[in-house]
Image (spheres, rainbow, N blue to C red):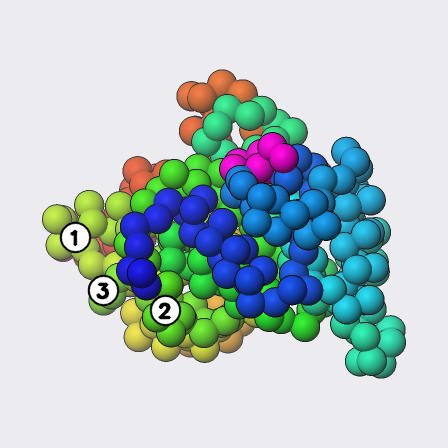
Amino acid sequence: MAMQELTYRDALRQALIDSMRDNPDVIIMGEEVGRYGGAYAVTKDLIREFGPERVIDTPISEPAIIGAAVGAAMAGLRPVAELMYVDFIGMTMDQLGNQAAKIRYMFGGQIGVPMVLRTQGGTGRSAGAQHSQSLEAYVMHTPGLRLAMPATVSDAYHLLRMALTKPDPVVFIEHKALYTMKETVDLSAAPTPWGEAAVRRSGDDLVIITYSRQLHYALEAAASLSKEGIEATVIDLRTLNPLDFETIRPHVERIGRVMVVSEGAMTAGVAAELSARITEECFDFLNEPVLRVAGEDIPISVSPVLETGSVPGAGLIADTARRMLRSRIAA
């Protein structure tokens, strides 16, 4: 059936199944992806259908996983390499950032690296400082790497399917707090095109630009603000490279008040890049400076209370919106 109620986890799993059935060159490799079924159960039972030659349990070595995936992709396969946590991406940056990202350029376009690196990040599981980071800025900063961060169950399916058709390496970051989220998904529907942002809510008072789990907090905040007469436009970026500025621009120019929300650290993060670009390209249309709402510049605590307080939530987003509109509210 095309219409199915799926969790975010199951949507990812179905995308892998459908892609592997359609293309025999798609393989999966990573720690415990086969017999165990993956750290977050996304690859559960795939080894039964596709066998150990296509669902490959690797040694516990992230550089080896990504290095092998790069070589396999250059040789004609389309590997999906899984890293249990995005926090481990630093160990792979020679293979990923210094090789995969640059091979098409260095070979004059003769060879690409059509691989997907699946990983997860973010807070919400009290996993501590070494397993709770949002490191998408590392990837966004590296030319040659594509970056997708789905916020919805539908995008978990469709973006992964599209990622597995791209000629260049795609880093696909899933938020650990979204795996159990449910949604009815039309698997046969034409998806929102790759690299195109989605306007999830429309309003005339404020633009909120975000992605991944923060989309849900932004929508919650927008619903709360609506009861007070404040209507926000909420834009879900979906992919950070490519970055769809053409969807952002007309809403910024129309409204003139912009908040950028990211779970990543404030300093030199995704929110900083977006704020700078909006300021540069839309300055004459802004009623006031672009505001960033982002994670604290601190390691993530294992304490649930401290963890929650270190990243944005619906309350902080709503309070920031009220501050941006304080003159109108006072009047």
Q: Which residue is mark 2?
A: 188
Contact between marks 1 and 3 (CB within 8 A): the answer is: yes
Q: Residue at x 23, y 64 (%)?
A: 203
Near mark 2 (Cα within 10 A), the count class, few <14, some 14-19 or many ≥20, is few
Q: Viewed as shown, does residue 232 lie left or right of 95?
A: left
**Residue ranking furthest to the right:** 107
Q: Which residues are magenta?
A: 35-41
Q: Viewed as shown, does residue 197 lie left or right of 163?
A: left
Q: Which residue is mark 1?
A: 226
Whether residue 36 appears in magenta in the rendering, the answer is yes
Residue 8, image x, y percentages: 41, 47
Q: CA distance from mark 2 to mark 1?
A: 34 Å
Q: CA distance from mark 1 to mark 3?
A: 9 Å
Q: Nearer the viewer, mark 2 or mark 1?
A: 2
* Residue placed most toward the observer, 8 or 139: 8
Residue 132, relative to residue 147: is it above or below?
above
